[in-house]
């Protein structure tokens, strides 16, 4: 029942937040509040899940897919971590642009988490692929909130990726059992042309390659990287963690499960397909890191870091080895957590200094030392150290995917993105540019410093007013644009609800006015979560190694 509660909270919260935020005004504030409450509820319900067979009706479900939902430790970890990071992300988005920045992000996050939960918990591969493809529609929701024809074009591209990719995966799921039987019918996979074995083996290899290409398209892995750069230019930067780091997680997990369950046990000679997938992984890691290094646009640079580091996911499929199961699923979680921290860091840096140009950020560390610490921690979470989940997963995938001596080449290629982190840190130590000099300093108020709140405007002859946003921090001169005064009928005093609303508006205005330390604290929180995930907190290693919750599927017998 906890899983059912999670799905209901996520679905209803997504609908209510979308409705309220779209209307604006008080409904928007109510929708945002309901959305945040739903997000907290989904996160709490995820951590409260008990591993084991859970069915939404309490009894086996019969129907088109004979679908059952199974709660696992891995599901609990992914959805719980996704929820924690999404709460921080929503706070960052609100600090950067108010409720307007939540209009697409909050409903899309809740909807994606709900669909992702179904995909990760599904005991049927077909349902898992369908639900995983549906999570990508969050990108469509966010893209449509952009302006101009570019937003429509981007939304159309994302719709094609999700619909076509989901259809292809479902087609692969139907082909694998038939091809597997043909491959094994002849008894010898190396049988002569025209035999069932000769027909089945290439079909299985083609399915593995196509499945990998669908996963690559969702992550923007080469040769599908152009979509990533275009998306980075269109959507607000605080939405990129959802679009680039989390939305592709469910379908990737289900794709790896399909290969592990239906392809790997056949033990077919797929050396050619393995070599092709290793080349794709190596090219993505090397070229992605190179593109991130040479780009002077900060958004493009961090987006290509995601492309480069996602290349390791290809090796989780290319290994065709049961031992790659746990390592691949561990790296998915590490990748999502560490890249969320990096992408939010980029969004805050862009807001703090008002530029996306890396050369214009020279000297940024002098103004934002906490952000520098967060970037170092994010790099550490990406690399890992011996004994950490991130390090062990990286080396295991390289060894299982290619074997010596190519495994060393793959490990080196997988850490090339560290040069991007180093470049950003080196730029930050230079002589500050004019943009950096003009930026708000990152500081923490000393003990005893209080918020300087202006008193409400004195009542006029016929109309009393209450100042809705009169908050200034000590030392600040220019107030933010204020809302119009809230009118109170003559001769009446503000009600309790009005006083609470005004107090909330004052606190919110104060928080957004002096948002620099709050944003830095949020980025630092995400970086710490990434380090803990890389280390293996919440028992990630054993959760990732547990069997897939696949009880039935299309032709899995």
Image (cartoon, rainbow, N blue to C red):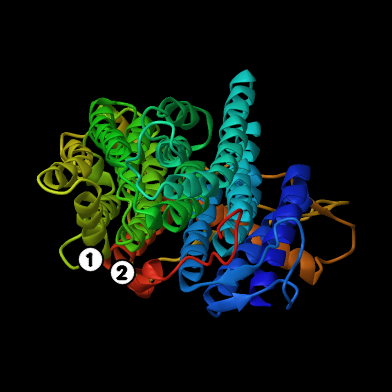
Residue 458: percent from the left, percent from the top? 73, 55
Within 10 Å of disc 1 (Cα), the crowding (few <14, some 14-19, many 20+) is some
Q: Circle 2: is it few (<14), some (14-19), or many (20+) Cα within 10 Å?
A: some
308 up-or-down from 127: above or below: above
The quarter of the image holding the C terminus is bottom right
Q: Position of residue 519 (x, y in %)?
A: 42, 53
Label 2 to label 1, Cα distance in Å? 6 Å
Picture layout, residue 460 above or below residue 528: above
The image quadrant of residue 170 is top right
Please indicate whether residue 8 sits to the left or right of residue 280 in the image: right
Asked if labels 1 and 2 touch by Cβ distance under 8 angstroms, the answer is: yes
Sequence order check, earlier mark of 2 and 1: 1
Q: Is residue 472 left or right of residue 387?
A: right
Which quadrant is home to the N terminus? bottom right
Q: Position of residue 525 (x, y in %)?
A: 38, 62
Residue 163 appears left or right of 379? right
Identify the residue at image location x=60%, y=30%.
Answer: 160
Q: Residue at x 51, y 72 (%)?
A: 72
- Location of mark 1 (residue): 388
Can the viewer see residue 457? no
Q: Is residue 245 above or below residue 226?
A: below
Residue annotated with mark 2: 536
Which one is nearer the viewer's eye here, 288 or 15?
Answer: 288
* Quadrant position of residue 363: top left
Residue 289, quarter of picture: top left
Q: 120 or 209: nearer the eye?
A: 209
Out of 470 and 348, give the one closest to the viewer: 348
Q: Secondary structure at mark 1?
A: loop
Which structural element holds mark 2? loop
- The disc at residue 244 is none
């Amino acid at each position: 029942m906890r899983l059912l509660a999670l799905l209901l909270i996520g679905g209803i919260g997504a609908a209510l937040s979308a409705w309220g935020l779209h209307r604006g005004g008080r409904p928007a504030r109510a929708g945002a509040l309901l959305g945040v409450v739903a997000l907290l509820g989904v996160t709490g319900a995820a951590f409260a899940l008990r591993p084991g067979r859970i069915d939404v009706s309490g009894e086996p479900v019969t129907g088109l897919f004979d679908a059952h939902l199974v709660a696992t430790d891995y599901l609990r970890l992914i959805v719980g971590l996704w929820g924690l990071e999404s709460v921080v992300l929503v706070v960052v988005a609100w600090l950067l642009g108010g409720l307007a920045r939540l209009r697409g992000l909050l409903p899309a996050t809740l909807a994606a988490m709900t669909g992702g939960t179904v995909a990760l918990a599904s005991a049927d591969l077909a349902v898992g692929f369908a639900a995983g493809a549906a999570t990508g529609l969050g990108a469509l929701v966010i893209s449509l909130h952009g302006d101009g024809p570019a937003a429509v074009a981007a939304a159309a591209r994302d719709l094609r990726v999700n619909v076509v990719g989901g259809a292809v995966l479902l087609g692969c799921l139907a082909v694998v059992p038939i091809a597997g039987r043909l491959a094994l019918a002849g008894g010898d996979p190396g049988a002569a042309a025209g035999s069932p074995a000769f027909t089945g083996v290439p079909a299985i290899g083609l399915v593995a390659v196509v499945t990998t290409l669908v996963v690559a398209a969702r992550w923007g892995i080469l040769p599908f990287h152009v979509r990533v750069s275009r998306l980075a230019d269109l959507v607000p930067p605080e939405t990129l963690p959802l679009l680039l780091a989390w939305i592709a997680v469910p379908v990737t997990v289900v794709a790896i499960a399909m290969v592990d369950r239906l392809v790997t046990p056949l033990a077919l000679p797929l050396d050619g397909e393995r070599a092709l997938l290793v080349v794709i992984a190596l090219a993505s890691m090397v070229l992605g890191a190179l593109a991130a290094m040479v780009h002077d646009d900060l958004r493009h640079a961090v987006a290509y870091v995601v492309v480069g580091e996602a290349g390791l996911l290809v090796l989780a499929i290319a290994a065709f080895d049961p031992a790659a199961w746990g390592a691949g699923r561990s790296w998915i979680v590490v990748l999502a957590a560490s890249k969320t921290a990096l992408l939010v860091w980029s969004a805050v840096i862009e807001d703090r200094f008002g530029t996306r140009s890396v050369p214009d950020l020279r000297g940024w560390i002098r103004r934002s030392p906490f952000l520098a610490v967060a970037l170092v921690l994010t790099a550490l979470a990406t690399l890992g150290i011996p004994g950490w989940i991130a390090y062990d997963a990286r080396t295991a995938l390289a060894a299982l995917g290619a074997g010596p001596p190519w495994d060393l080449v793959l490990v080196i290629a997988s850490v090339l993105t560290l040069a991007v982190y180093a470049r950003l840190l080196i730029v930050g130590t230079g002589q500050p540019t004019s943009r950096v000099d003009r930026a708000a300093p990152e500081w923490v108020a000393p003990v005893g410093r209080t918020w300087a709140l202006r008193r409400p405007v004195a009542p006029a002859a016929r109309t009393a007013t209450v100042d809705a946003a009169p908050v200034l921090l000590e030392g600040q001169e220019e107030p933010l644009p204020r809302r119009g005064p809230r009118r109170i009928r003559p001769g009446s005093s503000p009600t309790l609800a009005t006083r609470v609303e005004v107090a909330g508006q004052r606190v919110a205005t104060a928080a957004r006015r002096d948002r620099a330390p709050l944003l830095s604290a949020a980025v630092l929180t995400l970086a710490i979560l990434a380090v803990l995930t890389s280390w293996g907190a919440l028992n990630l290693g054993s959760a990732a190694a547990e069997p897939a919750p696949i009880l039935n599927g299309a032709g899995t017998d």
